[in-house]
Structure formats: C-alpha cells, structure tokens
C-alpha cells in the first residue's frame, strides 16, 4: 500500500515538474532591446527606471542629419524625480581623430546629460517631479543646420521640457546643442506654485502629448503663480523670461520677483470674499464701489500693482480690522491701512459680508 502511494506521489511530482518546464519554455522573454539593437539595461545606471514605455525616443536637436535618442528616467536611487539624457550613436567618439571609421556602423553610444547635470547652467534640479512633456521647436539662429529625414523623430534646434507636480507645471527647461565637448546647454525655471503662459489666465499651458503640438512656437516668457495667503486664495504672480543668445550659449531664465504682484489664484476677483484682505485686494483690482459701505469709495486708484498685503487676525469678537497694503498706483508707491467692517449674516441663507469703511496712509 505504501509503495503504491509513493508511486502515485512520484508521478504527480514528475507531472508537475514537466508542466512547469513547458510553461517556462512557452513564456515570452522580456525584450529590452532598443531600436539600436542595444540592451537598455546595459547602457544605463541601475537606478534609472525608464519613464517612457519605449525607453528611447528618436530626436534630433543638434543641427545634424543623424538621429539621437532621448532617454527619460526616474532616479529611483535618489529623489525619485525625472531626469534626462540624450544618447548620440557614433562610429567613434566625437573629438577623436586618426581612425578611418566613416564606413563602419555606429559602435559607440555617447550620453549627453540634460538634467540633472553638474555644469553651472544645469546644476539646479531635475526635469520634473511626477510627469514630463517635451517638444522640439525651431528658433532662428545663425548656425548652419541639417535635419534627418525621419518622420518618427522629434526634430528642431531646441528642446522644451515641461515638468509637472500634482497635475500642474512647476518646472520648465530648454536645451540646445553647443558642441561635442560641452554637449547640450540648458536653462531651468522653477516655482513652488505653477506656471502659465498667461498673466491673466492661471491655467494656460499646452499639452504636448509626446512631442506633438498644434504650434511650434518657442516659449520664452512664462508666469509663475505662487500661493501666498491660503485663506483668501491670493497668489504672487512673477514673470520669468528666457534671456541671452542661443548661438552664444548664454540662454538663461531670469525671474522678476522684484516686480511680482499679488492677484487671486483663480485669475478673477471674488464677488463676496470671506476674509477682509481679499475684499481690499479685490477693490484695488476691480474698483467695484459695492465693496465699500454705502457704496461710497473714499479713494480710487489706477494701474494698481499690489506688492504686499497683511492678513489681519480674526477672532469671534472681531467687528472691524485694519488691512495693511503696499501697492503701486500709476507708478507711485502707496502704503495704506484699510479699515474693513464685518457685516454678519441676516438670515439662514446669507453669509458674512466685509465692507471697506475707511482708509489712511501709514
């Protein structure tokens, strides 16, 4: 009886082993080969996890007829942010002479870092935190340019990369080819808020969808919208401008925080804000006389740019508060205190109203 049980168990075990063997033979082998017939795992650091499903992306922004390969990766061994490198397939490293290799297939894959990098212009950060979009654009230069005849490649003479955090763009970088020794130049703009192309619309930003967009215009001016006073949804708006010359490799982003102004983060003034500083800011921006008690404004200003506003403390016994505001009006600096009175709700369906009652210089 025991021999019979052991024999049956042996047959079952053998059958299971044979099943696993044939299943393994049938299982598809994961293919890490790139279009260059190079295993991506062999040419990248272990901690670099590919962001794009295809791994390498055809690109040409170095003004020659050859295709390069953009590799976007997540730095899993570091901050887990997104970096980028462009691999250049060469039959000999650029700058090396004395070898007749013009008839040979490319044997070298030279990496040129985008960000992060350790050159002065690119040592400020990564391309993005959670997601990146990219687009190649063409700008006018004095240097000779050739482009590959490949409809699948992203082609231009400047690469723009938008990095996103929680669904909004908070990093914007541009790259251009300098030379074989220096590789790609880069410039980065970063904000703790988010970027928009518009000073009026806080949500004006293109979606490039893997390098394709309905315009090919280079972006050289963007606006940062940075939250300042959370309870009133007030943001500081700051212009960033790309300055310098691409041919001279002097491009860099310059921010104008000195002239940044305060606006509402949604881009428009609220009709009945819940806090007094928002009522004052709204009046300075829209000059709506209904924001005053009895609709009798004591002052009115033109071409206002609010530089600073202090949110006053509010308690259950608050009736009137003073709001300190510094602002430019017609180019002249004003430093004023605005007295704002609370009007409690009159019934179940009404809310608190704030009305300006007085203003004076401080």
Image (cartoon, rainbow, N blue to C red):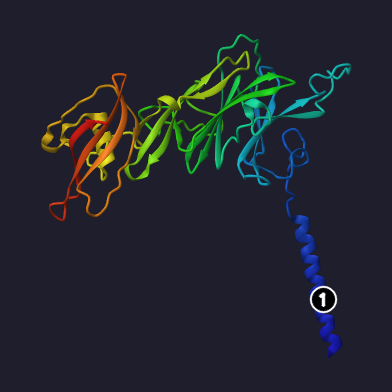
Residue under the image location 27 percent in, 52 percent down:
315
Left/right of residue 333 with respect to residue 208 in the rendered view: left
Residue 283 point in image, percent of width and height: 23, 32
Residue under the image location 80 percent in, 28 percent down:
108
Can residue 121 be seen in the rendering of this structure? yes
Residue 127 point in image, percent of width and height: 59, 35
* Quadrant of the drawing holding the N terminus: bottom right
Q: Nearer the viewer, residue 92 or 102?
A: 92
* Quadrant of the drawing holding the C terminus: top left
Residue under the image location 19 percent in, 48 percent down:
319
Q: Could you say which quadrant of the image residue 84 lies in?
A: top right
Q: Could you say which quadrant of the image residue 211 lies in?
A: top right
Q: Residue furthest front?
A: 362
Residue 339 against residue 220 in the figure, above or below: below
Secondary-structure class at tag 1: helix
Q: Residue furthest top?
A: 142
Q: Nearer the viewer, residue 242 or 139?
A: 242
Name the residue tied to disc 1.
Answer: 11
Q: Nearer the viewer, residue 153 or 357?
A: 357
**Residue neighbourhood size for the residue with mark 1, other residues' Cα within 10 Å, grouped as few (<14), some (14–19), many (≥20):** few
Can residue 215 be seen in the rendering of this structure? no
Tally of numbered discs? 1
Residue 356 against residue 18 in the figure, above or below: above
Residue under the image location 72 percent in, 34 percent down:
35
Residue 309 point in image, percent of width and height: 33, 35
């Amino acid at each position: 009886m025991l021999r019979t049980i052991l024999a049956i168990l042996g047959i079952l075990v053998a059958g299971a082993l044979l099943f696993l063997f044939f299943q393994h033979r049938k299982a598809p082998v994961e293919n890490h080969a790139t279009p260059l017939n190079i295993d991506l795992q062999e040419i990248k650091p272990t901690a670099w996890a590919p962001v794009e499903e295809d791994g390498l992306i055809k690109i040409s922004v170095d003004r020659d007829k050859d295709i390069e390969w953009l590799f976007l990766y997540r730095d899993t061994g570091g901050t887990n942010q997104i970096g980028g490198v462009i691999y250049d397939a060469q039959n000999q490293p650029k700058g090396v002479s004395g070898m007749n290799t013009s008839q040979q297939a490319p044997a070298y894959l030279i990496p040129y870092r985008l960000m992060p990098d350790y050159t002065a212009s690119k040592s400020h950060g990564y391309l993005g935190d959670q997601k990146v979009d990219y687009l190649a654009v063409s700008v006018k230069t004095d240097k000779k340019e050739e482009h590959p005849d490949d409809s699948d490649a992203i082609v231009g003479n400047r690469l723009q990369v938008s990095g996103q955090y929680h669904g909004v763009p908070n990093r914007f970088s541009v790259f251009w080819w300098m030379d074989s020794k220096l590789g790609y130049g880069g410039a980065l703009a970063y904000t703790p808020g988010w970027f928009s192309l518009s000073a009026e619309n806080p949500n004006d930003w293109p979606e490039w969808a893997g390098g394709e967009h309905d315009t090919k215009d280079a972006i050289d001016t963007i606006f940062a919208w940075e939250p300042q006073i959370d309870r009133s949804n007030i943001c500081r708006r700051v212009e960033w401008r790309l300055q310098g010359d691409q041919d001279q490799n002097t491009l860099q982003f310059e921010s104008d925080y000195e002239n940044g102004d305060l606006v509402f983060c949604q881009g428009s003034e609220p009709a009945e804000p819940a806090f007094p500083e928002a009522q004052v800011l709204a009046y300075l921006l829209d000059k709506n006389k209904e924001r005053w008690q009895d609709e009798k404004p004591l002052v009115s200003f033109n071409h206002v740019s609010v530089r600073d506003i202090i949110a006053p403390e509010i308690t259950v016994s608050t009736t009137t508060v003073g709001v300190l505001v510094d602002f430019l009006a017609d180019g002249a600096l004003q430093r004023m205190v605005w007295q704002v009175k609370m009007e409690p709700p009159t019934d179940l369906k009404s809310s608190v109203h704030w009305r300006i009652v007085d203003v004076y210089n401080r």
